[in-house]
Image (cartoon, helix red, strand yellow):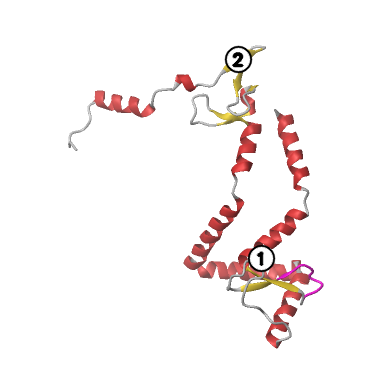
Amino acid sequence: MHNKPHTDIAKAKISTSKKGVPALWKRRATKSADGVTLYRCGKCKEFFDASCFYKDSRTLLGLKTECKKCHTATTIASRDLENSRRLNSEYMRRARAKNPDKFRERDRISSKINRIKHAGKVSAREKLNSAVRSGDVKKPNTCENCGNQTLLSGHHADYNKPLDVKWLCYSCHGKEHRAISFRRVDLAAVKESLTTQIGGAL
């Protein structure tokens, strides 16, 4: 590589090349209605005004190629919640190893709050732990869902029955609670409501 500074002409050429050349053949179709410019959605192919598109500074028009309704649907469909939870779990594991005192203090405060906020759950867990220590309840070595031999915790379907538990690994335990949370909500009704709201906004 040369060790001479670029000339002004060379700098101008570099600047122009980095800006790129607009791909006019890829520019989205437009049409005018009542003096308002409408842009075609790249997915549903319908025409909408600029307010129906999310902003995107990377495009020539400064708008997303999909209308808000299609963009939201694509985002939801491509969202991988399990992968997000796995990545977050790995991040938290590294963070705890890096600063254990910070998380130890946070857990201590959280434990105090939970003892007040979820007294029934805490009582059921303490009774279960006591029964395990006394030998009244035998704790298995394998997860009842996935069969892995690892650290297990007791899942209570009913906290009024503290000794009636399902022994699960931490991963399966979390999935069990999320499944219960999802069953409490009519997801189909929620999705239909959101779709109606988004469609109405368009």
Q: Which residue is mark 1?
A: 173
Residue 160 lies within the magenta run: yes
Q: Secondary structure at mark 1?
A: helix
Q: Name which residue lies at 69% across and 58% down.
A: 178
CB atoms of marks 2 and 1 within 8 Å: no
| Callout in the foreground (2, 1) | 1
Please tell me how crowded label 1 is: few (under 14), some (14-19), or many (20+) other residues with Cα within 10 Å: many
Coordinates of residue 198 in the picture (x, y in percent): 71, 34
Coordinates of residue 142 in the picture (x, y in percent): 62, 74
Is residue 9 or residue 46 the one in the foreground? 46
- Dominant secondary structure of the residues highlighted in magenta in the image: loop
Q: Name which residue lies at 54% across and 21% down.
A: 28
Q: Which residue is mark 2?
A: 31
In the picture provided, is 165 more to the left or to the right than 63?
right
Vertical order, 56 against 29 (above or below): below
In the picture provided, is 54 more to the left or to the right than 94?
right
What is the tally of numbered marks visible in this picture? Answer: 2
Please tell me how crowded label 2 is: few (under 14), some (14-19), or many (20+) other residues with Cα within 10 Å: few
**Residue type beneath disc 2:** Lys
Is residue 164 or residue 99 the one in the foreground? 164
Vertical order, 24 against 149 (above or below): above
Q: In the displayed image of the protein, which residue is found farthest to the top?
A: 34
Residues under labels 2 and 1: Cα distance? 54 Å
Please report whichever mark, 2 or 1, sits nearer to the chain's N-terminal start: 2
Q: Can you tell which quarter of the image residue 121 is in? A: bottom right
Q: Name which residue lies at 48% across and 22% down.
A: 26
Instruction: Read off the magenta span.
Output: 155-162
